[in-house]
Image: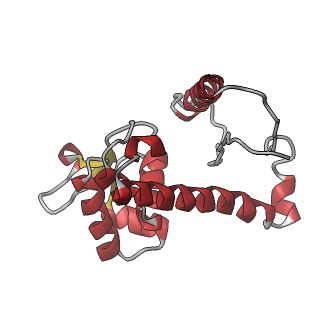
Amino acid sequence: MSITDSRVLAAMAHPVRRRLLDLLKLHGPCTASTLAQLSGEAVGNVSHHLRTLGAAGLIEEAPELARDRRERWWRRTAGPLCWSSTDFAGDAAGEAIARALASLDLERQTGHVRRWADQPEELQAQWSRGPFSTENWLRVTDDELAEYAAELIAVMAKWADRDIPDDGRERATVFTFARGVPARP
């Protein structure tokens, strides 16, 4: 989902809401109670953030999953969320929100990597082949970087959206991300 409305961007610019979106992506539709258990947040706080995400169109109720009139289930409405700061050029509030969300996302992404690096060696030894880090310097135009990004995003989507094989093997959650920005060594 390409986000061009600063109000939708603002709804995402909160750490709890970003986590709820992640949990809904990973676990599928959930109730506020389930999300509270998964996130460690209070049910009332989760409900508040779910309403904000719903008002922004990022999630929706899934009434067909409710067992009674009081139970409310929520699901994401869109696949990957993306935006470009250029979509908010000339809108001072939109630009500020985009910068804040970019900062929040970078902290969130590097936080996952830092937490893995801090895990005990015994746990890391159980993942002796999969975890990776890679980097490269490219010489590209803006259009070429966009093409490169589209290819990386497609590979990530292939793995994130695949049907999980029913082969009896336990699969853990893994966070992966990539960034490409103009820089100098």
Q: Is residue 160 left or right of residue 181?
A: left
Q: Is residue 185 left or right of residue 160?
A: right
Picture quadrant of residue 141: top right
Q: Is residue 125 left or right of residue 58?
A: right
Residue 103: x %, y % from top left: 56, 60
Residue 162: x %, y % from top left: 54, 28
Picture quadrant of residue 28: top left
Residue at 68% across, 58% down: 110
Residue at 42% across, 54% down: 95
User: Is residue 168 positioned above or below 32 on the image?
Assistant: above
Query: From where the camera sits, is residue 185 visible?
Result: yes
Residue at 45% across, 54% down: 98
User: Is residue 152 positioned above or below 116 on the image?
Assistant: above
Residue at 81% across, 40% down: 135
Residue 41: x %, y % from top left: 43, 74
The quadrant of the picture occupied by the N terminus is top left
